[in-house]
Each structure stands twice: as structure tokens, then as C-alpha cells.
Image (cartoon, rainbow, N blue to C red):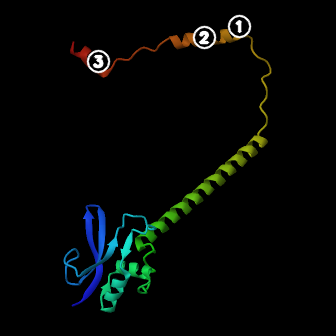
Amino acid sequence: MALAIRLARGGAKKRPFYRIVVADSRSPRDGRFIEKLGTYNPLLPKDSGERVKLDAERAKHWLDHGARPSDRVSRFLDDAGLMKRAPKNNPNKGKPSKKTLERIEAKKQAEQSAKEAAEVAKKAKAEAAEEAKAAEAAAPAEEAPAEETPAEEVKAQEAPAEEASTEQAPVEETPAEDEKKKEE
């Protein structure tokens, strides 16, 4: 008979509570067990002494009789000093996936092109400002008006222009009106 030291779940929905048990490896998770070795309450803080309770003497007895602990229970036994657990090493777990690397690269390229476009626009703006300054320096200064015309002369000049604008050109008849006249 293959023995396992594992967790059996208890507690309410979304409120887990586990018993650390020795059971036949073929029996169901929450089913029949041989002996209860302790408890594990994951809802308590990690530094709490009540989080994991374990009968170290009985656990040592069952380990000597060939019981194999589950991964979580082997962590508890390692913390209790009953067995040495080799740390797992998965160097690829922390690496981003191929698709994520492609997204990151595309984002970098977009940022780089945006920076280049901003620099080009800044240079073009600076060149335009320099050309405008050069054009101002090369252009002769505007001459001040020699004399202003008196207000009476201005009124006399505006009057004929107003009369011309009030006269209207004769209104042409539309083709629809022409047809009506022909029918009459």
C-alpha cells in the first residue's frame, strides 16, 4: 500500500481549512485517511503560529515507513526540520512570452519613431523661425505715411463708392419664368 502525507480540504465555501493526513494514495482527497497529523489554515497570517500545526513525531514515524509527502506538505516538513526539500527552479517562469516580447519591441519602435518625428518637427520649426528672421532683416523697413488726409476728403471719396453700390443690376429671369411667359 502506497502512503501519502497530504492535505484534506475542509471548511466552508471560499473559507478553506485543511487537515494534514496520512492516507492511502488511491483514496480520494477528502476521503478515508489513516491518521491526522495536524492542520493548516491559509486564512491566517504567515507569521501566525496557528497557521500550521503539525505533530512532528508522528510525521517522522510515517516518513520512516515510506509515506511520500505532497509538495505543500513537504514545505511544512522542511520548515519543521524533518526533511530537506530541494527548491524548485524554473528559470523560464519569469520570462515574458514570445508574443509579449513582440509587443514590447513594437512599442519601443513606435516610441522611437515618435521621438524622431518630434525632433524633425522641432528642427523644421527652428529653421522656419531663422528664415523669418533673415527675411525681416533683408526687407526694407516700411515707410511711414507722409500725410494723413483730412476727414472731409475721406467722406468725399467714400460717397461716390456708396452710390455705386446702391445701384443694382437688372435681375435676369430664370428659365422657369421664361417658359411660363411663352405658354401664356
Name the residue nearer the viewer: 158 or 103. 103
> What residue appears at the point 21 percent right and 91 percent down from the top-left corner?
1
Q: Which mark is residue 90?
A: none
Q: What element carries label 2?
A: helix
The residue tagged 1 is 152
> What residue appears at the point 33 percent right and 72 percent down from the top-left corner?
39
Where 166 sits versus 128, above or below?
Answer: above
Q: What's the CA distance linking mark 1 and mark 3?
A: 49 Å
Q: Is mark 3 on a helix, strand or loop?
A: helix
> What residue appears at the point 68 percent right and 50 percent down from the top-left corner?
126
Choose top left, top right, bottom left or bottom right for residue 114.
bottom right
Q: How crowded is mark 2: few (under 14 residues within 10 Å), some or many (20 or more)?
A: few
> What residue appears at the point 38 percent right and 17 percent down from the top-left corner?
172
Left or right: 154 in relation to 26: right
* Image position, residue 124 (x, y; %): 64, 52
Left or right: 51 in relation to 35: right
Q: What's the CA distance linking mark 2 and mark 1?
A: 14 Å
The residue tagged 2 is 160
Q: Residues within 10 Å of mark 1 (few under 14, many from 20)?
A: few
Name the residue nearer the viewer: 42 or 180. 42
Q: Residues within 10 Å of mark 3 (few under 14, many from 20)?
A: few
Left or right: 183 in relation to 41: left
Q: Earlier in the sequence, mark 2 or mark 3?
A: 2
The residue tagged 3 is 178
* Image position, residue 97 (x, y; %): 41, 73
Q: Is mark 1 on a helix, strand or loop?
A: helix
Left or right: 64 in relation to 47: left
